[in-house]
Image (spheres, coloured by chain):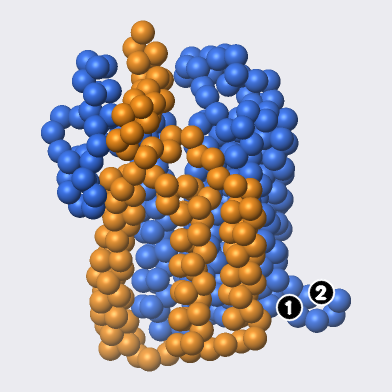
C-alpha cells in the first residue's frame, strides 16, 4: 500500500488545470508533497474561514437592514490621550501588535527548520507574549465599552445590533488568539526540550513530531492575524 | 509500522521526486530572512495606510476602495509569504483558495435579503425610529 502511494507521489504532473485534475483524479493522495498534518491544518483553517465569513456576513446584513444609524466606530473606539481624542488608536495598536507577532512567528518557523532550537523557542514565546498583549488590550476595550453601556441588545449611540455583532465577532477572534497562545507555549516547550530532535512522542497523540509542527502552528497563528485584517477593515474602518 | 509509513510519507515523496528530478517540491520551507523582513515592513506600511484612511476621515467610495485595497494586499501577503502558500502545490492552492469564493456568492444573496428587509421595515414602520 505504501509503495503505491509513494509511486504516485513521485510522479510528475502537467502544468495548470490538467495537473490539478491529474492530482485529484483516481484513488490516490491529492496533495502530493504536502504532509497530512499541514493539509489538515489548511482544511481546518478553510472551515474556520467559513465561520468568520458567516459572522461578517451576518454583521453586514444587520448593518444594511437597520433603519437606525450605525454607531460611528471611529468615535466609539476613540481614546483620550493627553487631552485629545484620537480615533481608533487602541485598535490600531492592536493591529500592529498582531502583525508584529505574525512576523516573529514566521521567523520562528524559519529557525525551526534550521534546527536552531533556542532562537525558534524564544521567538515563539515572544509571539505568545504579543498574542497575550493583544488579548489583554481586547479585554480593556470590552471593559471600556461595557462600562459605557454597550450591551448585546443595545447601546447609547445607535443601532441595537452593534453590540451583539461586536461581542460575537471580536469575542470569537479573541478566543482564537487565546487558544493560539496556549498552543504556542506548548509547541515552544517542545522545541526548547528538543522533542523534535530526539523523536519524543507527544503527550496527546503519542506520535513523534518534527519541525513541521512549528510551521503548522504558524499557519494557525497567521490565520488569526489574517482574520483580524478582515475584522479591522469591515468592522472598525467601514 | 503504520505510524512510520504515515510520518515518513511527505519526506519520502519529496526525496523520490528530487531523485527523479520530476517535481520541484518544497517540503522544507527555506527562504532568506530578508524576504520575511520585507513582507513584515510592507504589512506595517499597509496597516498604517488603512489607519490613515480613518485618521484623516476619508469618506465615501474612496474610503471603501482604499480599505478594500489595503485589506486584500495585506491578506495576500500573509497567505502567500507567511503561510507559504506561494510555494505550495497548485492542487493545494486551489483547494484552499477557491472555496472562500462561495462566501462572496453568499454575500451577494445577503445583500439582496438585507435590502428587502430594510424595504419592509421602512414600509411598515416608517423611515426613522
Residue B11 image position (x, y, % from top left): 41, 25
Q: Secondary structure at mark 2?
A: strand
Q: On screen, B40 above or below A61?
A: above
Give the labeled residue for mark 1.
A86
Question: Does the rendering let one see residue A24?
Answer: yes
Give the residue displayed 42% in from the left and 90% down from the top.
B128
In the image: residue A198, left or right of residue B24: right
Q: Quadrant of residue B47?
A: bottom right
Q: Which chain is orange?
A: B
Q: Which residue is mark 2?
A: A81
Residue B33 has which mark? none
Nearest the viewer among B41 and A92 is: B41
The outermost residue toward the left is A26
Query: Is mark 2 in CB contact (under 8 Å) with mark 1?
Result: yes
Chain letter of disc 2? A
Q: Is residue B124 left or right of residue A79?
A: left
Q: Colour of chain A?
A: blue
Q: Residues within 10 Å of mark 2 (few under 14, many from 20)?
A: few
* x then y, percent, for residue A211: 55, 29
Can you say whether B88 is above or below A56 in the image? above
Between discs 2 and 1, the one toward the N terminus: 2
Residue A190, percent from left and from top: 63, 24
Disc 1 is placed on an element classified as strand
Amino acid at each position: 500500500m505504501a509503495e503505491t502511494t509513494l509511486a504516485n507521489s513521485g510522479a510528475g504532473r502537467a502544468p495548470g488545470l490538467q495537473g490539478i485534475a491529474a492530482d485529484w483524479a483516481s484513488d490516490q493522495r491529492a496533495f502530493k508533497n504536502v504532509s497530512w498534518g499541514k493539509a489538515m491544518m489548511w482544511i481546518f483553517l478553510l472551515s474556520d474561514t467559513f465561520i468568520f465569513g458567516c459572522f461578517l456576513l451576518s454583521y453586514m446584513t444587520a448593518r444594511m437592514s437597520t433603519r437606525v444609524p450605525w454607531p460611528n466606530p471611529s468615535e466609539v473606539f476613540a481614546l483620550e490621550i493627553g487631552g485629545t481624542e484620537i480615533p481608533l488608536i487602541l485598535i490600531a495598536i492592536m493591529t500592529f501588535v498582531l502583525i508584529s507577532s505574525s512576523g516573529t512567528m514566521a521567523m520562528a518557523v524559519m529557525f525551526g527548520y534550521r534546527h536552531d532550537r533556542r532562537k525558534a523557542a524564544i521567538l515563539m514565546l515572544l509571539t505568545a507574549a504579543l498574542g497575550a498583549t493583544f488579548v489583554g488590550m481586547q479585554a480593556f476595550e470590552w471593559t471600556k465599552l461595557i462600562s459605557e453601556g454597550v450591551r448585546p441588545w443595545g447601546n447609547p449611540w445607535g443601532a441595537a445590533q452593534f453590540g451583539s455583532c461586536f461581542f460575537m465577532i471580536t469575542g470569537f477572534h479573541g478566543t482564537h488568539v487565546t487558544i493560539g497562545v496556549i498552543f504556542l507555549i506548548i509547541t515552544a516547550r517542545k522545541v526548547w526540550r528538543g522533542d523534535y530532535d530526539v523523536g519524543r512522542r507527544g503527550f496527546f497523540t503519542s506520535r513523534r513530531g518534527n519541525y513541521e509542527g512549528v510551521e503548522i502552528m504558524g499557519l494557525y497563528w497567521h490565520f488569526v492575524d489574517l482574520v483580524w485584517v478582515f475584522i479591522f477593515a469591515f468592522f472598525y474602518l467601514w | 509500522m503504520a505510524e512510520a509509513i504515515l510520518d515518513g510519507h511527505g519526506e519520502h515523496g519529496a526525496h523520490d521526486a528530487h531523485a527523479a528530478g520530476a517535481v520541484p517540491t518544497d517540503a522544507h520551507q527555506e527562504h532568506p530572512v530578508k524576504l520575511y523582513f520585507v513582507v513584515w515592513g510592507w504589512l506595517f506600511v499597509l496597516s498604517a495606510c488603512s489607519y490613515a484612511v480613518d485618521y484623516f476621515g476619508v469618506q465615501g467610495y474612496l474610503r471603501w476602495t482604499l480599505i478594500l485595497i489595503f485589506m486584500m494586499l495585506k491578506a495576500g501577503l500573509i497567505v502567500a509569504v507567511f503561510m507559504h502558500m506561494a510555494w505550495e502545490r497548485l492542487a493545494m492552492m486551489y483547494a484552499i483558495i477557491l472555496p472562500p469564493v462561495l462566501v462572496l456568492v453568499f454575500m451577494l444573496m445577503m445583500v439582496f435579503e438585507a435590502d428587502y428587509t430594510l424595504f419592509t421595515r421602512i414600509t411598515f414602520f416608517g423611515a426613522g425610529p
